Image (cartoon, helix red, strand yellow):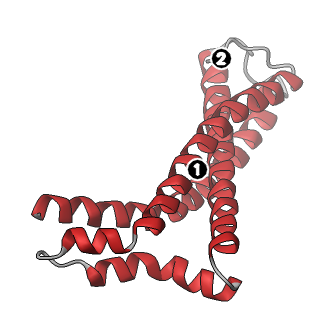
């Protein structure tokens, strides 16, 4: 039971931290895009560096990575919010009640867990677990889609500037 208890606590913490991690990473990558964009404009596009130099390729790769990660986290966070909203609107009588229950679920789960009745605690929140797991899986899927789209869009933005580099 101790192992199951640890797994549940870890899953609950993971569920609560996903939006915060996606948001923080999205903001961080937004500032990185700005930084690398400025560096591309000032050093690469004005002819200060050769477009085929290792420095140029490195900056373009960092820009592309930041752009891809920003798009990935933005789409993942949007998916998390949209699917959470759908869950709240579909499963609860009022939006207010759904919002309260949505955010209290992990806390209620923490409070209801005890070593003797851990399986009963899990069964009591079975539908919540199902929806939360579905939200996590869909968020992960959309995050992967965002990474793919971000890479394509980022390469297009680099090519628009005339920096046709062989970047990964």
Residue nearer the viewer, 6 or 41: 6
- Residue 47 position by quadrant: top right
Q: Is residue 120 above or below residue 45?
A: below
Residue that mark 1 sits on? 139
Element class at badge 1: helix
Residue nearer the viewer, 37 or 154: 154
Q: Is residue 101 above or below residue 89?
A: below
What is the spatial separation of the Cα atoms under label 1 and label 2, in whole angstroms?
Answer: 28 Å
Q: Residue at x 37, y 83 (%)?
A: 108
Q: Residue at x 66, y 30 (%)?
A: 148
Q: Is residue 134 above or below residue 150?
A: below
- Residue 110 position by quadrant: bottom left
State which tag comes first along the sequence, 1 or 2.
1
Neighbor class of circle 2 (other Cα within 10 Å; few <14, some 14-19, many 20+) is: few
Q: Position of residue 158 (x, y in %)?
A: 79, 26
Residue nearer the viewer, 8 or 42: 8
Which quadrant does the N terminus fall into? bottom left
**Is residue 109 at least partly visible in the picture?**
yes
Residue nearer the viewer, 32 or 83: 83
Q: Position of residue 20 (x, y in %)?
A: 52, 65
- Residue 4 position by quadrant: bottom left
Q: Residue 16, which numbered label? A: none
Element class at badge 2: loop
**Is residue 30 at least partly visible in the picture?**
no
Q: Residue at x 34, y 60 (%)?
A: 11
Is 25 on the left-hand or right-hand side of 160?
left
Residue that mark 2 sits on? 167
Neighbor class of circle 1 (other Cα within 10 Å; few <14, some 14-19, many 20+) is: many
Which quadrant does the C terminus fall into? top right
- Whether tag 1 and tag 2 are in contact, CB under 8 A, the answer is no
Nearer the observer: mark 1 or 2; the answer is: 1
Q: Position of residue 155 (x, y in %)?
A: 75, 25
């Amino acid at each position: 039971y101790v192992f199951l208890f640890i797994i549940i606590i870890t899953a609950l913490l993971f569920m609560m931290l996903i939006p915060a991690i996606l948001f923080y990473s999205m903001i961080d990558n937004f500032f990185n895009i700005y930084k690398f964009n400025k560096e591309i404009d000032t050093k690469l596009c004005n002819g200060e560096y050769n477009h085929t130099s290792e420095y140029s390729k490195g900056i373009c790769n960092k820009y592309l990575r930041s752009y891809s990660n920003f798009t990935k986290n933005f789409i993942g966070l949007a998916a998390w919010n949209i699917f959470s909203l759908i869950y709240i609107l579909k499963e609860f009588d009022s939006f207010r009640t759904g919002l309260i229950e949505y955010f209290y679920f992990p806390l209620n789960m923490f409070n209801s867990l005890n070593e003797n009745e851990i399986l009963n605690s899990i069964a009591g929140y079975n539908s919540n677990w199902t929806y939360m797991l579905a939200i996590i899986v869909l968020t992960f899927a959309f995050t992967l889609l965002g990474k793919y789209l971000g890479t394509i869009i980022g390469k297009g933005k680099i090519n628009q500037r005339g920096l046709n580099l062989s970047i990964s």
